[in-house]
Amino acid sequence: DGGITQSPKYLFRKEGQNVTLSCEQNLNHDAMYWYRQDPGQGLRLIYYSQIVNDFQKGDIAEGYSVSREKKESFPLTVTSAQKNPTAFYLCASSIGQGVDEQYFGPGTRLTVT
Amino acid sequence: AQTVTQSQPEMSVQEAETVTLSCTYDTSESDYYLFWYKQPPSRQMILVIRQEAYKQQNATENRFSVNFQKAAKSFSLKISDSQLGDAAMYFCAYRSDTSGTYKYIFGTGTRLKVLA
């Protein structure tokens, strides 16, 4: 079945540690996205990539980093510089052309203590 | 910059009744797409309906329909014959078709409760 996978579903880390969230898609989509979701704030864009080896900062990129070495994969690293990393993180992908719609993964809940 | 506003943080509807969720947006562009996404308690985001701005006809998907008013920059979602499974967060989203980027802008969401 085609889709987007995010792992793990729940992730716990100590403050000061970097952590990488996985996102893989087998939909052959060119574009991939990372969002952060906090209560009452909707989805806020962290980074997006429209093609392999290229990505752009979204609205809240500070404290995060990404890579896009393969079309299928778009991992997000939450660094120790992110002041408030505890949140629900959603990965999405889309064709990246024409009438484009986003497909979402199941999300990762990150808790940093 | 484009913005999307959902002014109703929470709505309730009786089962089998009809409810309308509001969404307004601000843009100077003429070509764009609008979406409604549903996020049930599982938190899996699901596309409900899509509207191309160049189309005058309102989109419909079974019990879901939109009222797209381009001049007013309004994009409301109507759910008919509401079912318990419709209970979820609903997000309105905008994507430009002129900027060359496939960046989506989401509203803050409306939580819909369906009363039995």
Image (tube, helix red, strand yellow):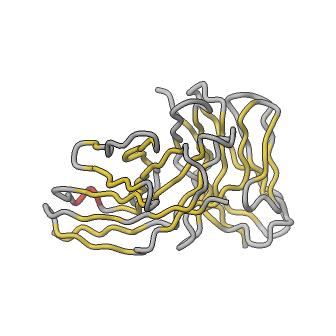
Residue A106: give x, y in percent of width and height: 52, 48
Left or right, B114 with respect to B97, comes to left
Left or right, B99 with respect to B84, comes to right
Q: Which residue is drawn at 51% across and 33% down?
A: A99
Query: Which of the 4 image quarters holds residue A17?
Result: bottom right
Instruction: Please tell me which residue lies in front, A16 or A26.
Output: A26
Residue A7: give x, y in percent of width and height: 62, 45
In the rendered view, tell whether residue B96 sits above or below residue B43.
above
Toward the left, the furthest residue is B16
Image quarter in which the C terminus of chain A is found: bottom right
Instruction: Please tell me which residue lies in front, B23 or B84.
Output: B23
Q: Residue at x 62, y 33 (%)?
A: A96
Residue B104: give x, y in percent of width and height: 60, 50
Residue A9: give x, y in percent of width and height: 57, 52
Instruction: Please tell me which residue lies in front, A27 or B2.
Output: B2
Left or right, A47 with respect to A8, comes to right
In the rendered view, tell whether residue B32 sits above or below residue A89.
above
Query: Which of the 4 image quarters holds residue B81?
Result: bottom left
Q: Which residue is drawn at 51% across and 67% down?
A: B5
